[in-house]
């Protein structure tokens, strides 16, 4: 009897579609075509110089060996300080685990907390990874559909209906990727009370907390009650705020037993996050913060442009996001129609035709659990955005 090569677990998940589309756009670029990519899930800015210099210094100084599996104490303490400063949260070093990016942090939380059959509630449209991680560890993602006209935030009734005796966790991502949806404090207070009533854990992915517009200032759900503080795992990192996606440093703040379990898992799997990157992260959190506001201002300027520009195209409506660096326009008015004789069956077909005929790369909404939309990243120059809108306009004008 032959054994199958791969286990059943790995077949439960798909490769990250966002990464796949970026790769296809890069291939077309390499073939000499003038492709404009709006599929990026990362800031386009260079990592600030003070941070790069800290990494160079760490390298030259020989800080190039294994560190503690959960990260160096200085960095864990810097996260404690940062959470106090930014969110008013009181943690100790034992509440902090440093991981290889926030994605790794999320994976490890799921790996140490979720059992086969446990349910985790995830509002859609969602970041693909949440669903994949839940499935990989054998949990059941319970998806809540949201509406554009509700700002892509679930209603109180939606939350209540999603809870079953198997629910263990609620996931919130504020501001959200892919919609840029943001929660009001009252929404979060409701979720905190609901979690308490049903004895649930909360994962709060706050990676976009510093990329916010129109004066929106997110509060962390962990600040809203004693229960929420004890049962929320705050996940964050340096990738988005400091334009450091390649450095791979993220962190979790919360229950010390969960954190200890995550560190135990890291000690037997990845070991420590890269020593040099940890020193760079330390500089990011403790060094001058002026680059953060500079990048935020740029993002807001681009958001202002792109939302207006997309809403001025016939057939497209675009929600105005108060955070992150994506817009999530509704393109469903084109479904069932044709581009040069080719039928537009959904967001995937729309994205394919757009890449092929207009040379612009976007991520189809289906990748985030809602086929009526596409994700258009504005982590690119205003000049590229202007050109992209022109190409998109010409493309949709040819849809019959
Ligand atoms: C980019 C992103 C992350 C994590 O990024 P890392 O680079 O792994 O720290 C987490 N959540 C969301 C919603 C993201 O978009």
Image (tube, helix red, strand yellow):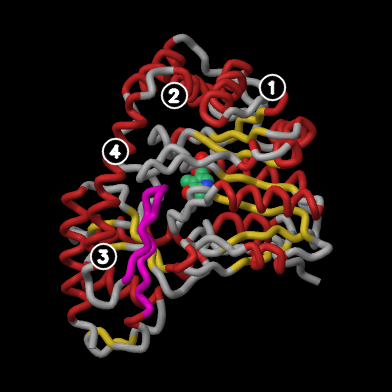
**Where, quadrant-wise, is the N terminus in this rendering?**
bottom right
Asked whether mark 2 lies closer than 8 Å to ligand 1, one says no
Is disc 3 surrounded by few (<14), some (14 to 19) or many (20+) residues within 10 Å? Answer: many
Q: Which mark is residue 297?
A: 4
Q: Quadrant of residue 205?
A: top right
Could you tell me how far apart the alpha carbons at marks 2 and 3 are, in whole angstroms?
Answer: 34 Å
**Residue 277 position in % (x across, y down):** 48, 26
- What residue do we see at 48% from left, 48% from top? 175
The residues colored magenta run 317-332
Q: Quadrant of residue 232?
A: top right
Q: Which mark is residue 92?
A: 1
Q: Nearer the viewer, mark 2 or mark 3?
A: 3
Asked whether mark 4 lies closer than 8 Å to ligand 1, one says no
Mark 3 or 1 closer to N-term? 1
Q: Residue furthest right?
A: 165
Is disc 2 surrounded by few (<14), some (14 to 19) or many (20+) residues within 10 Å? Answer: many
Local SS, label 1 = loop
Could you tell me how far apart the alpha carbons at marks 4 and 1 are, in whole angstroms?
Answer: 33 Å
**Where, quadrant-wise, is the C terminus in this rendering?**
bottom left
Q: Which residue is mark 2?
A: 284
User: Vertically, is 175 above or below 253?
Assistant: below
Is 322 displayed left or right of 122 in the figure? left
- What residue do we see at 35% from left, 45% from top? 214
Mark 3 or 4 closer to N-term? 4
Is 397 displayed left or right of 62 in the figure? left
Q: Which residue is mark 3?
A: 310
Q: Nearer the viewer, mark 2 or mark 4?
A: 4
Dots 2, 1 in contact, CB < 8 A: no
């Amino acid at each position: 009897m032959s054994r199958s090569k791969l286990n059943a677990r790995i077949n439960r998940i798909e490769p990250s579609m966002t990464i796949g589309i970026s790769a296809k756009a890069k291939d077309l670029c390499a073939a000499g075509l003038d492709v404009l990519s709006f599929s990026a899930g990362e800031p386009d800015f260079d990592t600030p110089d003070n941070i790069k210099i800290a990494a160079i210094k760490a390298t030259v100084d020989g800080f190039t060996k294994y560190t503690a599996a959960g990260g160096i104490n200085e960095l864990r303490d810097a996260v404690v300080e940062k959470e106090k400063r930014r969110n008013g949260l009181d943690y100790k070093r034992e509440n902090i685990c440093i991981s290889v990016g926030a994605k790794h942090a999320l994976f490890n939380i799921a790996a140490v907390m979720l059992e086969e059959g446990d349910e985790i509630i995830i509002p859609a449209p969602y970041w693909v990874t949440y669903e994949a991680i839940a499935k990989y560890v054998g949990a059941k993602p319970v998806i809540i559909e949201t509406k554009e006209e509700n700002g892509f935030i679930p209603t109180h009734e939606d939350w209540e209906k999603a809870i079953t005796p198997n629910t263990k966790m609620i996931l919130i991502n504020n501001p959200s990727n892919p919609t840029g949806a943001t929660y009001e404090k009252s929404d979060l207070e409701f979720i905190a009370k609901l979690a308490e009533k049903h004895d649930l854990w909360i994962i709060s992915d706050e990676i976009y907390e510093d990329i916010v517009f129109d004066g929106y200032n997110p509060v962390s759900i962990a600040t809203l009650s004693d229960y929420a503080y004890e049962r929320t795992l705050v996940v964050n990192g340096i990738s988005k705020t400091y334009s450091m996606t390649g450095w791979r440093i993220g962190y979790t703040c919360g229950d010390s037993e969960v954190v200890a379990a995550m560190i135990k898992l890291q000690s037997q799997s990845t070991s420590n996050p890269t020593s040099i990157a940890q020193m760079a992260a330390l500089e990011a959190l403790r060094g001058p913060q002026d680059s953060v506001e500079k990048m935020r201002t740029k993002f807001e300027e681009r958001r202002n442009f792109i939302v207006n520009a997309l809403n001025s195209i016939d057939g497209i409506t675009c929600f105005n996001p108060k955070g992150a660096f994506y817009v999530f326009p509704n393109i469903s008015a084109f479904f069932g129609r044709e581009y040069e004789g080719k039928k537009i069956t959904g967001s995937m077909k729309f994205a394919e035709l757009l890449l092929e005929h207009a040379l612009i790369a976007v991520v189809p909404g289906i990748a985030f659990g809602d086929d009526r939309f596409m994700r258009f990243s504005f982590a690119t120059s205003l000049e590229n955005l202007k050109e992209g809108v022109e190409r998109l306009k010409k493309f949709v004008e040819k849809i019959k």
